[in-house]
Image: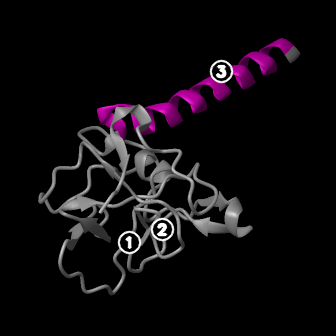
Amino acid sequence: MQRRSLLFSTSATLLLGASLLVGCAGPRGMGGPGARGMGGPGHPGMMKRHGYGMAAPATAPAGAPMVANGLLTGPNGMTLYTFDRDMAGSGKSVCNGPCATNWPPLMAGNAAPAGDYSVVTRDDGGKQLAYKGKPLYYWVKDTKPGDMTGDGFNGVWHVVKP
């Protein structure tokens, strides 16, 4: 019985790990046809932002981006990223579901964008802030302002340099 339990536990762990990787590595995890999973803007999941000593909702706080050290950051000082698979000017984000769990969108809130900023509509109807037509995201593995560990991730995620 212990062997069966160990086998089940190991299998479940491997399946969960593979699901998380697919969420940011392949087209199905990018909100394309057949995308599945929980998470993203409407999910009540929490992520830990160690730099602030508190849990933040899986969706990023709304507000105006700022420039710090030549990079675009959110209102919380965390680095913002763009995703190569988002088409500039398309008016939508393709990072949904598990992808948005790892790359929380910068929500527009009641912002009235101007200049290089615009708003795109997410699959769940939420409004996301975009820079030069590209939706803006945080990376859950950045733990403090100034971190930019998501730059170059899978060759498709990049910091924003205004």
Residue at the spot of label 2: 60
Of residues 23 and 151, the one drawn nearer to the viewer in this rendering = 151
Residue 107 numbered mark, or none: 1
Q: How many marks?
A: 3
| Amino acid under disc 3 | Ser
Labels 2 and 1: the sequence-earlier one: 2
Give the spatial CA distance, label 1 vs label 3. Answer: 36 Å
Look at the magenta stretch and give its main secondary structure.
helix
- Decide: few, some or many residues near mark 1? Use Cα within 10 Å; few <14, some 14-19, many ≥20: many
| Amino acid under disc 1 | Met
**Side of 9 relative to 133 (left or right):** right
Whole-percent x and y of residue 20? 52, 36
Whole-percent x and y of residue 144? 63, 60
- At 26% from the left and 66% from the top, the residue drawn is 130
Whole-percent x and y of residue 145? 58, 63
Q: Is residue 58 above or below residue 20?
A: below
Q: Residue furthest left?
A: 89
Give the spatial CA distance, label 2 vs label 1. Answer: 6 Å
- Decide: few, some or many residues near mark 2? Use Cα within 10 Å; few <14, some 14-19, many ≥20: many
- SS type, badge 1: loop
Give the spatial CA distance, label 2 vs label 3. Answer: 32 Å
Whole-percent x and y of residue 30? 32, 42
Q: Residue furthest front?
A: 69
Asked if one can make out residue 87 in the rendered structure from this viewpoint, the answer is yes
